[in-house]
Amino acid sequence: MTNISLNNQNFIIGGDITDDQWTYNWLRYAPNVALAAKSGHLLDLVAQGYLPDDGLDYELLLSVWVWTTNKSGQTASIWIYGGENASSNNGIRVAIAGVTTRANSTQVAGQSCIFPLINNNKKLFIYNSSSHSTSTSWGVQLAGYRKINKY
Amino acid sequence: MVNYIENIQINKSPISLNSPVFHGQWVEKSLSIFASQSFPNKQNQYVDYSLEGYLPNDGFDYEVIFCLIVNTASPVNSTCYCWLCSGKEHSLRGRASTVVTRVANPESCAGQVCLPIKANDRYVSVYFESGNSNNTGKCWLNAYAYRRIGTNQWNIDNSITGLKFANKEFRFGGDLVDGPWVFKQVTLWSNVTLQPKSGNIVTVDLSQCVPNDGKNYTCLIDGTATTSNVINTYESIRVKTNSTNDWMTLMEQITRAAGTRLTYFNMYFPLSGGGRSIQLKNTGSTVSTCNLRFCAYRRIGNND
């Protein structure tokens, strides 16, 4: 049975009307450069070969970690944008990892997030919203993704 | 335009459309998986915990919202890099708590992770990327809510609970399936003070963020919390929705050296039963200054 006809209108069955199952796929991205104050770093998931360029929406299981410098009172404040940069007001932004250095020793923060990517955007902009630079040790770890239904 | 399908009959047998092809509704059910568990004394250790009895034994995959709280060991440079993993397979994981001891007293940290749990692997695993040599670090793990993951498969069987077709596109009418993600940035709080020991429980109105249509949603919120600068005090922010009596920990931190501390948190959570508010409190010993921001929502399909 490939179609049902009701009142002379055809309903075609199948396809991707519901969310997909989770795909487990690991990516560790750690560019080993400090994130300067009020600056960001672009991660293109299609260019990395992590997601296909298929025009569909996805959810990611995303983790971030960041180390501060050892200067007491300085902070690291990492936001993740879905998109090219931090200037879009229509995209998604999640504040994911923030921490303050005290006692003149480095400190670390790390959190995870279910992060949606829609409207054929498959880029993450990792932004340090602090007025201080991070250390060179920071990165993004992606554990998996799933395609969201064609609504 | 799409057409509502309320009933299809083939050869006079009804076909059910509210099948497990679709995701289920969120069920807010709390479970203390373990409390005051010691860290392993070696790095890169996995400790598996069964979710039998928490999730239905029905052969379906589920998403579960977890929270991990950790206290590091006392010695300086005691690390806590803890993750939560889906099942014994360990291959899908998210960071939960990440902090290091810098003054010779334990640090505290908490984080939420939402994970899929497979039908044939009903475990959550804590991955201790860093161990501690004297075994005095402790952690707590709780689950708060779960949701069936749809099979996305239509199978032919004798009871005609579904149909299998190939290479064809099916448009349902109405809201049977989950909606698309809607990104909506709304500042909910700026520099709100949460008094210690649950001194003030604050209700956050989300009706400006999510449609007031009586439907169920999944929401994503982020926030920041800053301690006072009083040494050896801590903050612990908890949240609950209006459809549960259980409080989920969003963040924890302790001030050990002079100066305020900042941390970030995010929350992926259900908004069910037409409710459009959440409540937050601080069970710590010092005031917490918080910012809260709404990020996005997604309607949950009406598949019941």
Image (cartoon, coloured by chain):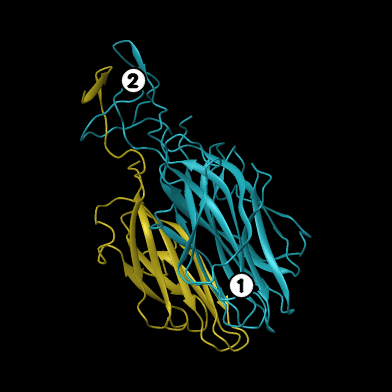
Chain colours: A yellow, B cyan
Circles 1 and 2: CB atoms closer than 8 Å: no
State the quadrant of the N terminus of chain A: top left
Q: Is B78 on the left-hand or right-hand side of B91?
A: right
Q: Position of residue B168 (x, y in %)?
A: 22, 33
Q: How many marks?
A: 2
Q: Is residue B271 above or below residue B94?
A: above
Using a 10 Å C-alpha cutoff, classify the residue at mark 1 as few (fewer than 14 neighbours), some (14 to 19) or many (20 or more).
many
Give above or below for B110 relative to A6.
below
Task: Report the disc number at residue B72.
Answer: 1
| Label annotation for residue A58 | none
At a point 45% along the width and 31% down the height, the residue shown is B303
SS of the residue at dot 2? loop
Q: CA distance from mark 1 to mark 2?
A: 55 Å
- Looking at the image, which residue is at 50% across and 75% down? A129
Q: Amino acid at mark 1?
A: Thr
Work out whether residue B280 or residue B66 is closer to the camera in this orientation and state it.
B66
Q: Which residue is mark 2?
A: B160
The amino acid at mark 2 is Ile
